[in-house]
Amino acid sequence: MDALDIAALSKAVEGENLSNLLEDNIAVAGRTDSWMLNHTSQDEIHEAVLAQPNQVGTSRGANLWRKAALGIAQDRIARKRLSDKAYRERCKEGKNKMQDELDKLTVENKLVKFANQSIRTEIDSMNLKLQSAAQETKQLQSAMNKLRRQNGCQQVLMEAFLQKMVGSRDGDHRLDKLTHEITKLRQNVVFTGWMGETMQLLNRVAELEHQNRDLKVQVQALCEKISNDKDVEGSSSIV
């Protein structure tokens, strides 16, 4: 091809034969220029050529086409770099956001595990306390049953002693009557040789009086003990 004008170029562009024409004119551009050319649309090259001043000649036309293709390709590369950079920034931002969420979830998970462990520990402690309380309740119930049995025995003893006290009162009455009779006999009867028998009788009366006093003291002490035991049992039942 000896000459190539702008009209021919425009005609070639309109006929969509631009690729063949460019391959004939920029074979010396190298692999890089060919790659850029192959990734450059015909419309973009056409617009770039029309924007240049009219030039004639094969070498000038080839240079024009090569510069146009290189400029467009470089612009594409720049835009692609910007797009890739923006994409990487978005990926980085998304990754950082996911890492922040993961860290937050990790902290929350640790807090939940700690709370669960605390709850388990509290439940175990409460179970031990309940077991101890149940054992103590069982022991108290056994003690109360024992006190009831003892109280029953003490009531029987108290009734027996009360009966003895009633009998002792009758004995006291008979003793008083006997003493009164002895006094009358002393006043009405002359003191004769049976003095020894009378002294024995008097000694027996004194001995009975002493035994009667001891019995009264024992009965009183037993009654007080029974009353105290009842008070203790009542306090235990309230607790």
Image (spheres, rainbow, N blue to C red):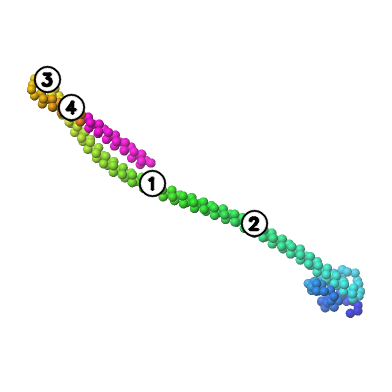
- 89 horizontally vs 11: left or right: left
**Between disc 2 and disc 3, whose residue precedes?**
2
**Disc 2 to disc 4: CB gap under 8 Å:** no
Q: Measure the C-alpha gap from mark 3 to mark 1.
A: 73 Å
Regarding mark 2 in the picture, which secondary structure is present there? Answer: helix
Q: Measure the C-alpha gap from mark 3 to mark 4.
A: 20 Å
Residue tagged 1 = 136
Q: Residues within 10 Å of mark 1 (few under 14, many from 20)?
A: few
**Between disc 3 and disc 4, whose residue precedes?**
3
Q: Nearer the viewer, mark 2 or mark 4?
A: 4
Residue at image location 46% in from the left, 50% down from the top: 125
Residue tagged 3 = 187
Residue 100 numbered tag: 2
Viewer-nearest residue: 7 or 100: 100
- 60 horizontally vs 96: left or right: right
Q: Residues within 10 Å of mark 4 (few under 14, many from 20)?
A: few
Q: Nearer the viewer, mark 2 or mark 1?
A: 1
Callout 1 amino acid: Glu
Region in magenta? 212-239
x and y, in percent, of residue 101 in the image: 63, 57
Q: Residues within 10 Å of mark 2 (few under 14, many from 20)?
A: few
Can you say which quadrant of the picture contains the N terminus?
A: bottom right
Q: Measure the C-alpha gap from mark 2 to mark 4.
A: 107 Å
**Between disc 2 and disc 4, whose residue precedes?**
2
Q: Is residue 12 visible?
A: no
Regarding mark 3 in the picture, which secondary structure is present there? Answer: helix
